[in-house]
Image (cartoon, rainbow, N blue to C red):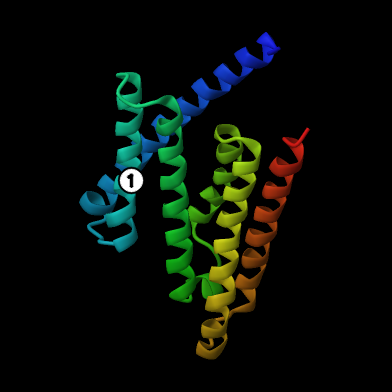
Amino acid sequence: MTNPLLDSSTRFRRRVTLLLLLLGGLAALLAWYTTFKVARGVVWLDFVLLPLGIVCFLALFLMRMGRLSQRNAELIPVAALALYQLGALTEFAFKGLMYGQGFSGTAMWFPLFYPLVFLLMPYRRALVASSLYFGFALLVLLSSLPLALSGGWIKTSAINSVVQFYLTNIMYMLLYGFRLNR
């Protein structure tokens, strides 16, 4: 027997999530525009992965038109967010910027993956997806650290932000993982 209050709550959360994902797609379009028109910079990550935000917008449009299931429309932006964030983290780490100056503003959006994945996926799949997401981020740290040490990129002022970034991600993963496991 299903709880009608829970069902209406789930529907409301899905509607809010779709609205936020739509806004995220529009923000990606704006970021892509400003990267190429205003800043006149060509960053490979923005050139390749920001259009995924536009694809998210298209997926939401197709869902509203009845051409794509709601479940698939919700998972496409989550996958796009993961690809963009993991790509940005990898580039930042292997260029030595993470160890020399700390994290960029993009890193603030990295933990957004956890609430989205736990909201949109069944618990076990969300736990696996969030573990893989964080595991890849940890792999980036461990594989780029020897390069940073040998290249002399590490500045003590940046260590704090690196430690906080990884601890915050662990806390988000544990918070959502344990809170939703009731």
The residue shown at (57%, 56%) is 132
**Residue at the outermost top position:** 4
Task: Return the x and y of residue 159 as percentages of the image width and height.
Answer: 64, 72
Q: Amino acid at mark 1?
A: Leu
Q: Residues within 10 Å of mark 1 (few under 14, many from 20)?
A: many
Q: Return the residue nearer the eye: 177 or 34.
A: 177
Q: Return the residue nearer the eye: 31 or 68.
A: 68
Task: Return the x and y of residue 23 as percentages of the image width and height.
Answer: 41, 32
Above-or-below relation of 114 to 41: above
Label total for image:
1
Task: Return the x and y of residue 165 as percentages of the image width and height.
Answer: 63, 59
**Residue at the outermost front position:** 1
Task: Return the x and y of residue 68 as percentages of the image width and height.
Answer: 34, 27
Give the side of residue 55 with respect to residue 96, left or right.
Answer: left
- Which residue, given by chain and number where applicable, does mark 1 sit on? 52
Above-or-below relation of 46 to 161: above
Give the side of residue 152 with respect to residue 79, left or right.
Answer: right
The residue shown at (61%, 13%) is 8
Which image quarter: residue 135? Answer: bottom right
Above-or-below relation of 49 to 61: below
**Residue at the outermost bottom position:** 150
Which image quarter: residue 88? Answer: bottom left
> Which SS class for mark 1?
helix
Give the side of residue 147 with respect to residue 36, left or right.
Answer: right
Above-or-below relation of 100 to 4: below
Q: Return the residue nearer the eye: 4 or 9.
A: 4
The residue shown at (46%, 29%) is 71
Give the side of residue 90 with respect to residue 171, left or right.
Answer: left
